[in-house]
Image (spheres, rainbow, N blue to C red):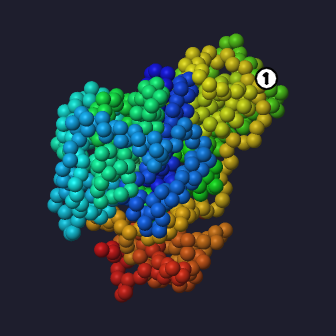
Amino acid sequence: MASENKFYVTTPIYYVTARPHLGSLYSTLLADVAARWNKLYGKKTFFLTGTDEHGQKIAEAAEKAGKKPKDFVDSFIESYQGVWNSYEIQYNHFIRTTDKGHAHGVQEWIKYVQKKGDIYKANYQGWYCVSCETFLTESEAKDFKGEYPACPTCGRQTKYISEESYFFKLSSYQDKLLKFYEDNPNFITPKERLNEVVSFVKSGLKDLSISRTTVRWGIPFPGDPKHVVYVWADALNNYLTAIGYQQPGEEKEFNFWWPADLQILGKDIVRFHAVYWPAFLMAADLALPKKLLVHGWIKVGQQKMSKSLGNVIDPQNLLDAYGAEPVRYYLCRHMSIAQDSEFSVPDLEQKINSDLANDLGNLLNRTITLALKNELGDVTAPKTWSKDAIELKDKFSSCLTEYTADFNEGFFNRALTNLWHYINNLNSYFQHNEPWSLAKADKQKFAEVISATCHGLYGTAILLWPIMPKKMTELLDALNVKLKVDGQNYIEQLKTLQWNLQFKIKQIEPLFKKIEHAESPKMTEDKSEFNKKEPDIEPTITIDDFLKVKLLVGTVEQCEPIQGSDKLLKLQVDFGKLGKRQILSGIKQLFSPEELLNKQFVFVFNLAPRKMMGLESQGMLLITKDDQGKAAFITPSVSVSNGSRLQ
Ligand code: MSP
């Protein structure tokens, strides 16, 4: 991230065909965390997010909903802004590509590039994915089976289009792009993504179609209103138009913020941001962004979230159940930047309990209670520290060095893992010194242990502030520290901190509540009206995807209800040569144990084991339910050997 005193960060702008989901929250949250982190350095920050509102995908979705495109997109804006606000996402500007100023900026960009000779008119023929709004390359559209090639990104059906189009001379930027990647090896985090981009560009760039005549919902192409601007040429320019590009009187503002210091995006849209976007900027004679942070997908049940799979998680449901900051923490710490990550509610609950309530919250609580019980409200640092406290201080310094390096690279999850090692050290130090005994036996040492723990908590709270701003303000408040993120460089202060602070300890409510309920609430119901309709295009899977799921026949040998659960039955299932397994199933209200006993059913055999009500479930029983809620089992038509596989 930039060393100068400003930081401009962007999120992708979201297609507004539904309310935001957990994936959209993730991209936006990372940007908020990056902006807040840079505020801790005392920088001026500008955080941009918004919505991508033109193009064929939106036009088709609006038509399906029986609405005009503008009315359709308008209907979702409040839900985006509402969810961002409740998650404490402090954006500076929310751009909509239907904003007038944006359209003007895009048209000016086209005129500029046209004047340079980098745009020409020809005919486009090829395959198009409406869901990703992308043209398939020749190699992507080669050798397909069936009537159409599937989109390599989303797997959906593509459409053949043939129409007059304006082309951007992308091919003439191939060498310049390769030189840029070579000169800027840190342009993309993680580095592996840059390698993929380099090989894509090396394989040869074709000119890019940047206008459509068969779509009407878009920005009119300057000088040729039969055409509208291709939605990606429209959308990418939002990063410029939002800060005043080509707006009279806004030059100073624009020159102050551009280039962006960090652009956040998911792995599915790397090509647009790492190839087309830099070429567009080169054509406009503008500087290139300093860094792209490319994150993996959040998966639910091993799949990317998708409306048709019914596994979409609504951030609002999570917020209602767990509060904003624990969810912010979980996403930043336990979703990996570099890879796809599996999101699961039981794991979220477990991490809230272990990391937040136990490791951090409990330590603060114990420190406060012990200090106040022993009349140590005013905590002063000793003149000289003991060896173990000096070690603790040194550990914080090395943690700080690694934390800042990881954070500045965009590896927030790795930074947090590191910080938790430190929190564990802090807990061990506290535990090992047994301050509850020292309170009577050695008051001086007692005061030292409390002071050292407070210093450790103080540093931790500052580093965690970008992730959990309210909770960390509360933590600091318990130590009588007021955090003013107003231009001072807190990170530099932490680096030089001498552990000579005075704290005044105050009782506060526990920072994090433990989650204690028998079963996790279900999070995947989709509430929006639009989402309830059937999608028109089903994503497909390959045979390899199918073969990953091991569906086996097994006989239920024992079946009994689980005490305290109104949903679960516990089954002992015989899988023949593969042995016996305990499987829990939430069907107590649908079937009696007698209906299952000694019968054969179909089970998912290779589902990761999961604990429910303290018992492990080692697979899943398959059933079906119709629209009226009538449930039925899946059984083989004749008896087969236990352990037989469905194929
Ligand atoms: N409109 C384009 C972006 C234009 S930017 C100039 C777009 N929109 S999107 O709504 O489909 O996706 C926006 C972002 O959300 C992408 O970065 C995408 O990777 C991210 N996510 C969508 N689903 C996701 C997950 N399941 N997990 C993590 N992020 C994913 O593409």
* 440 versus 263 height, above or below: above
Q: Estimate the x, y position of residue 614 in percent, counting from the top left.
A: 59, 60
In terms of image quadrants, where is residue 450? top right
Q: Estimate the x, y position of residue 270 in percent, counting from the top left.
A: 33, 44
Q: Left or right: 533 with respect to 207?
A: right
Local crowd at mark 1 within 10 Å, few (<14), some, or many (≥20)?
A: some
Q: Which residue is at 69% across, 19% downward?
A: 501
Q: Which residue is at 30% across, 74% downward?
A: 647
Q: Estimate the x, y position of residue 316 in percent, counting from the top left.
A: 59, 55
Q: Which residue is at 19% across, 33% downward?
A: 175
Which residue type does callout 1 highlight? Asp
Is residue 134 something that shows in the picture? no
Which residue is label 1 attached to?
Answer: 378
Residue nearest the viewer, comparing 587 with 184: 184
Q: Left or right: 356 with respect to 49?
A: right
Q: Estimate the x, y position of residue 173 in percent, counting from the top left.
A: 21, 35
